[in-house]
Image (spheres, rainbow, N blue to C red):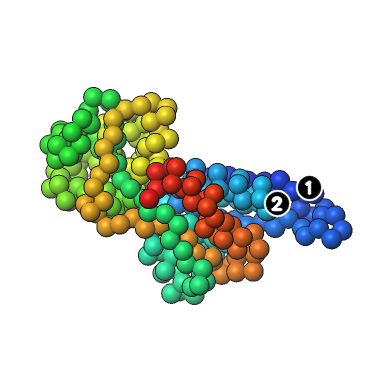
């Protein structure tokens, strides 16, 4: 299935290709975004478009899938990954610009259930509850899935829960499993759970950060976008105070 596409149009006075004399044409960049960051990326792209007049198109998938697409020539200009190792790997492989590497967020995992009465003592529930189905993202594709596996190993439940795990292709799909009731609970990004709780409520518990490796999320300018002013400008905007406040408001450290 092709990644979801979210087109964020720049709010310039003149459409691309019809710039007034002396007015720079609207630039456009295609940003590959890890699924956990999709909503925040959309908001940041809108903010950047209003400020710059440029246009940002967003493609959403798991970090692992985006990496594979970039390796196979997908014309992305920037990667916002859910880890720091994938952008570094792309730099090492000559597919990204080393000087552009930037840690834009630190993610957190939460235990979440639609059942408002289930997660009263989060650690006890995670260690002892007899889950019917339990959702995480696929650890082979999604850094948050790898972190969830580490948490389940930490509490000694990884082997016991194997038959009951439902693996999302990305964290968005894993969150949908809990949101729809197809899974009783899951270990999911705090950012997505905050959004889901606005719809259905439920109960949640913030997993201690030292139960898994830090989820450091890095951005990098890809070689395809190395001369693209919209891509370069968007990466610079990630460091802006307005962008930082938006990222923090959506559950990131």
Which residue is at the front of the view, 202 or 136? 202
Residue 44: x percent and y percent?
Answer: 55, 48
- Mark 1 nearby-residue class (10 Å; few <14, some 14–19, many ≥20): few
Residue extending farthest to the right is 21
Residue extending farthest to the front is 241
Q: Residue at x 23, y 47 (%)?
A: 208
CA distance separating discs 2 and 1: 8 Å
Count of picture labels: 2
Residue 41: x percent and y percent?
Answer: 52, 48
Q: Is residue 128 above or below residue 7?
A: above
* Left or right of residue 82, residue 128 in this image: left
* Left or right of residue 85, residue 229 in this image: right
Residue 55: x percent and y percent?
Answer: 66, 51
Q: Is residue 69 above or below residue 99?
A: above
The reply to whether residue 43 is in sight is: yes
The reply to whether residue 159 is in sight is: no
Element type at mark 2:
loop
Using the image, tell me which numbered label, if any, was put on residue 21. none
Q: Are marks 2 and 1 in contact (CB under 8 Å)?
A: yes
Residue named by callout 1: 13
Q: Is residue 177 above or below residue 239?
A: above
* Left or right of residue 104, residue 163 in this image: left
- Choose top left, top right, bottom left or bottom right for residue 192: top left
Using the image, tell me which numbered label, if any, was put on residue 53. 2
- Mark 2 nearby-residue class (10 Å; few <14, some 14–19, many ≥20): many
Element type at mark 1:
loop
Q: Earlier in the sequence, mark 2 or mark 1?
A: 1
Q: Residue at x 48, y 73 (%)?
A: 98
Which residue is at the front of the view, 148 or 12? 12
Q: Residue at x 28, y 26 (%)?
A: 115
Q: Residue at x 33, y 33 (%)?
A: 178
Residue 205: x percent and y percent?
Answer: 26, 37
């Amino acid at each position: 299935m092709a990644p979801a596409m979210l087109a964020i149009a720049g709010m310039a006075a003149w459409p691309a290709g019809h710039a007034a004399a002396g007015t720079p044409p609207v630039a456009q960049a295609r940003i590959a975004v890890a699924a956990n960051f999709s909503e925040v990326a959309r908001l940041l792209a809108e903010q950047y478009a209003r400020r710059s007049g440029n246009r940002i198109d967003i493609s959403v998938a798991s970090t692992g899938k985006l990496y594979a697409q970039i390796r196979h020539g997908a014309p992305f200009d920037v990667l916002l990954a859910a880890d720091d190792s994938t952008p570094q790997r792309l730099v090492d492989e000559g597919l990204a610009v080393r000087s552009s590497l930037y840690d834009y967020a630190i993610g957190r995992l939460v235990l979440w259930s639609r059942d408002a009465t289930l997660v009263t003592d989060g650690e006890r529930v995670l260690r002892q509850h007899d889950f019917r189905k339990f959702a995480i993202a696929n650890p082979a594709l999604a850094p948050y899935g790898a972190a969830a596996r580490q948490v389940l190993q930490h509490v000694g439940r990884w082997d016991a829960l194997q038959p009951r795990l439902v693996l999302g292709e990305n964290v968005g799909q894993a969150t949908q499993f809990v949101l729809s009731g197809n899974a009783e609970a899951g270990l999911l990004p705090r950012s997505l759970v905050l959004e889901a709780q606005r719809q259905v409520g439920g109960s949640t518990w913030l997993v201690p950060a030292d139960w898994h490796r830090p989820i450091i999320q890095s951005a990098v300018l890809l070689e395809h976008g190395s001369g693209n002013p919209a891509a370069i400008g968007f990466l610079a905007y990630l460091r802006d105070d307005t962008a930082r406040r938006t990222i923090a408001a959506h559950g990131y450290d």
